[in-house]
Every structure is written in structure tokens, then in C-alpha cells.
Image (cartoon, helix red, strand yellow):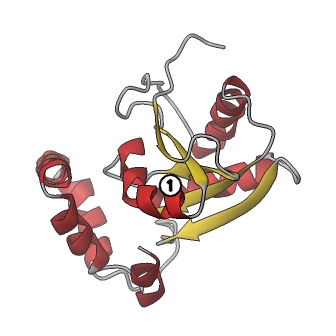
Amino acid sequence: ADGRNLGYNEFGVRDGDLTILFFHGMPASGLEAGYFHDAAVESNCRILAPTRPGVGTSSFQANRRVSDWPRDVEQFVAAMGLTEFSIMGYSTGNPYALACARWFEWPTLKSIAVVNGIAPACVPFDAGRSATFFDLACRRPRLVGRGLQMLDQMMCRHPDRAVRLMMRDMAPADQEFV
């Protein structure tokens, strides 16, 4: 409605029994949902993976907050003609999924899944490598940016290797799911 582009990717079965909105992690885009394509086909599900503003083909918008995302999703589901759907948040996509859980009501929002959830930065926790990553990102953003570009290239060229790398930091239950 405001002229911005919201890119998305589609996987699974177009006319499936259930439509799942997949909210990607970082560094990633809606393409990340492709890892779940085979499972979606087997389960007769459709996955629509909108890409957040400023990522991939989605238009950048300054001063965005997580709480702005449900309005974008509302316009997206209307444009796609959806009357009901489920949401799957992955990693840093989870705060966006939870914002939508507060915005949408039953029966429009059928269910929500939090996969490989992360704690907000303000919550003290033993994060191991994640804490080191966020600390380094604050002190050396250009270095971390280059590292994320290299990870993105690896995901494109060697997705199986990239998934194995990411799984090292996942809880056992999340590893089993992926």
C-alpha cells in the first residue's frame, strides 16, 4: 500500500492443505525456507517466505521495528488471498513470528512454531559463540559483515555444509527438526 516491494519465495505444494509463512533468520532471506521444501511436499503444505525489508528483493525502510512487521504480513496475506495460515519463525525470525502471534487472531492464525529460538540481547544468558558474535559485531561491524557475506556465499554454493555448520549451535531438538 505504501509502494514498497516485499519479496518472497514459495516452496512445497501450491494448493497444499496448510499454508505456512516462514520468517527467515539472519543472515538469510526467504530462500532459507527451501531447506524445508521436501518436508512441505511430503506433508502437502505450502511455504511462503516473505523477506524482511532491506533484505533480498524487499525494499529498505528506515527506522523499522519488529512491531512494524505484522502490518507488512497483513498486506502480504491479503495480496496472496489467504484467509488462514500458520507461522514458522527460524532463529532471528522468531521475534517477527511472535509479533504476528500478538497481531493475528484465531482462526486466521492457526499455529505458530518457534524453531532454534534465541533470547533477546537484553536477557543475560550463557550464549557461548553467539555472545562472542554479537560482541564482535558491535566492535568490528565491517569484519562481521564480510564474514556474513562469506557465509551467504557458502549457503548458495554448498547448502548442506552451511546447514551442518549452523546445526553445531542448535539444541538437540532443533537439530532433529532440521
Give the x, y percent position of residue 17. Answer: 70, 53
Q: Nearer the viewer, residue 39 or 29?
A: 39
Q: What residue is drawn where x is 49% and y is 19%?
A: 5
Residue 176 falls in image quadrant: bottom left
Q: Nearer the viewer, residue 47 or 52?
A: 47
- Three-letter code for the amino acid on which mark 1 is drawn: Gly
- Above or below, comparing residue 72 to residue 166 in the picture: above
Q: Tell me the element at label 1.
A: helix
Disc 1 crowd rating (10 Å Cα; few below 14, some 14-19, many 20+) is many
Give the x, y percent position of residue 172. Answer: 41, 89
Give the x, y percent position of residue 111. Answer: 74, 62
Quadrant the N terminus occupies: top right
Q: What residue is drawn where x is 74% and y is 55%?
A: 101
Q: Nearer the viewer, residue 46 or 175?
A: 46
Instruction: Answer left or right for 132 relative to 72.
Output: left
Q: What residue is drawn where x is 43% and y is 60%?
A: 38
Q: Give the residue at mark 1.
A: 93
